[in-house]
């Protein structure tokens, strides 16, 4: 599976999100990452289903929504109806992860689980058949612009080995502090989707990172 960038709208200009989505499309993006924060699981509050629903008619990009919320089971129906293609829930946010993942799949979209930096990969043992994506958080969730935590590299490698050993097509996504200086190392560790916000929307020549990651992957 070739690696790709999923630009995070958390770092985009919220006054013109439709135009920001068009910009990443023009650079060859296939996915757009939506950081959904509720002010409870994490301190920040971002966007909800009405914003996603408003964007959906204006793009055919794969909408990758990461729920950093408490009680994620309550948000499945609203976000499915808004038009997302994949919902990722935090392992740490629910006591009934199996049920939540099954409900996402039953709604007809893809399901993922996110692991905070200190959460070990062994927690995935009994839910692998339900996972279309595993998201390794390489910062502590809740804010953009943080520094990548190098200690997650062995976790990425371990999860990549497990996916390969099980013969799965599960995507391995990494989110937090990703830029053109560490993207190669993260891809080499086994990541197939790199979430990048500040590095795309706020860095000089940031949009080119979308194309560069694809080039990195083909050279790896």
Image (cartoon, helix red, strand yellow):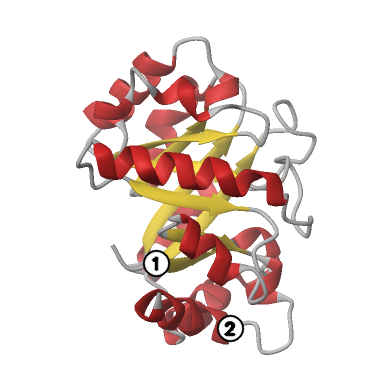
Answer yes or no: is residue 49 visible. Answer: no
Q: Which mark is residue 3?
A: 1
Q: Can you give x and y, in whole percent of width and height, for residue 103 in the image?
A: 31, 22
Quarter location, residue 124: top left
**Residue 17 percent across, percent down from the top left:** 59, 69
Q: How many marks?
A: 2
Q: Quadrant of the N terminus?
A: bottom left
Picture residue at 19% right of the left edge, 42% below the top: 167
Judging depth in this view, the residue of 108 and 91 nearest the camera is 91
The answer to which of marks 1 and 2 sits earlier in the sequence is: 1
Please state, as top left, top right, bottom left or bottom right, where the C terminus lies in the image. bottom left
* Point 52% across, 10% down: residue: 95
Residue 146: mark:
none
Q: Residue, x 22% and y 27% (percent of image)?
A: 106
70 up-or-down from 86: above or below: above
Q: Which mark is residue 207?
A: 2
Residues packed near mark 2 inside 10 Å, few (<14), some (14 to 19) or many (20 plus): many
């Amino acid at each position: 599976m070739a690696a790709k960038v999923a630009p995070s709208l958390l770092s985009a200009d919220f006054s013109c999100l439709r135009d920001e989505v068009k910009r990443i499309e023009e650079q060859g993006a296939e996915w757009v990452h939506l950081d959904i924060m509720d002010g409870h699981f994490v301190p920040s509050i971002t966007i909800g289903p009405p914003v996603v629903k408003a964007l959906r008619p204006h793009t055919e990009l794969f909408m990758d929504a990461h729920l950093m919320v408490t009680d994620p089971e309550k948000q499945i129906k609203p976000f499915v109806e808004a038009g997302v293609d994949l919902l990722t829930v935090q392992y740490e946010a629910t006591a009934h992860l199996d049920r939540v993942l099954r409900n996402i799949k039953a709604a007809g979209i893809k399901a993922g689980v996110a692991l905070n930096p200190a959460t070990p990969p062994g927690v995935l043992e009994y839910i692998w058949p339900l996972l279309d994506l595993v998201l390794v958080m390489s910062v502590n969730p809740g804010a953009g612009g943080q520094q990548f935590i190098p200690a997650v590299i062995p976790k990425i490698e371990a999860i990549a080995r497990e996916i390969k050993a099980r013969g799965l097509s599960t995507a391995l996504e990494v989110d937090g502090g990703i830029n053109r200086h560490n993207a190669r190392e993260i891809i080499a560790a086994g990541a197939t989707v790199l979430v990048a916000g500040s590095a795309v929307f706020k860095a000089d020549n940031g949009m080119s990172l979308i194309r560069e990651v694809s080039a990195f992957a083909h050279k790896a």
